[in-house]
Amino acid sequence: MCCKIMGIKELNKPPGIWCSHCKPARGCAIYESRPQECRTFICGWLHSPDLDERWKPSVCKFLLMDDAGDTHIVVDPARPDAWKKEPYYSCFKGWAQMGLDAGMKVIVAIGKRAIVILPDRDVDLGIMEEGERMVTVREETPLGARYNALKLHKDDPRC
């Protein structure tokens, strides 16, 4: 799935389409000379021994990535709801709860669209443009604390 979902600058391969060097059931045809982006990519499924075969990207139709402590779920655009299926969705909700106090986010990316998973709801931020950032904020309500996700320009002082 990384050969489809990920964009590879060195190959001018946009995200969401299969790499021309990917050969079904055989892998990468240029593996020995593959770009540095491909060499350094580490799939969260391979990196996390607690995740079983159901989390293999070719099965679940998304990649798990860590970026500065945030968990990114990069979804195959042909299967935009794959992340909502079980057992994945309830795990994402649990990860969101654990990460809030540490300032970490669980983010779904479907192309340029971003959705932040919070324990009590999902916040669809829409298309993320260059220069935009996402933040989670704690809001005090009469019923207690509630978290929200916002899309802000990188120059916004709340970033």
Image: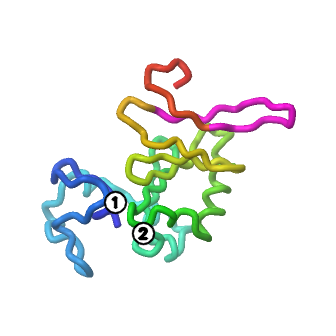
Placement of 136 over or under 7, stated as above or below: above
At mark 1, the secondary structure is: helix
Left or right placement of residue 102 versus residue 24 in this view: right
Left or right placement of residue 19 versus residue 145 in this view: left
Number of on-image labels: 2
Placement of 67 over or under 28, stated as above or below: above
Q: Nearer the viewer, mark 1 or mark 2?
A: 1
Q: Amino acid at mark 1?
A: Ile
Residue 147 inside the magenta-drawn segment = yes
Q: Specify the quadrant that holds the N terminus.
A: bottom left
Residue at the spot 60% in from the left edge and 50% down from the top edge: 117
The residue carrying mark 2 is: 57
Q: Amino acid at mark 2?
A: Pro
Do labels 1 and 2 touch, CB within 8 Å?
A: yes
Q: Nearer the viewer, residue 130 or 8?
A: 130
Question: Residue 118 — which label?
Answer: none
Residue at the spot 43% in from the left edge and 68% down from the top edge: 61
Residue at the spot 25% in from the left edge and 51% down from the top edge: 37
The residue carrying mark 1 is: 5
Question: Which residue is outermost to the right?
Answer: 142
Residues shaded magenta:
133-148
Q: Quadrant of residue 46?
A: bottom left
Magenta portion: prevailing SS class: strand
Q: Nearer the viewer, residue 141 or 31?
A: 141
Image coordinates of residue 58 in percent, x first then y, are 40, 73
Other residues around mark 2 within 10 Å, as few (<14) / some (14–19) / many (≥20): many
Image coordinates of residue 25 in percent, x first then y, are 26, 81
Q: Earlier in the sequence, mark 1 or mark 2?
A: 1
At mark 2, the secondary structure is: helix
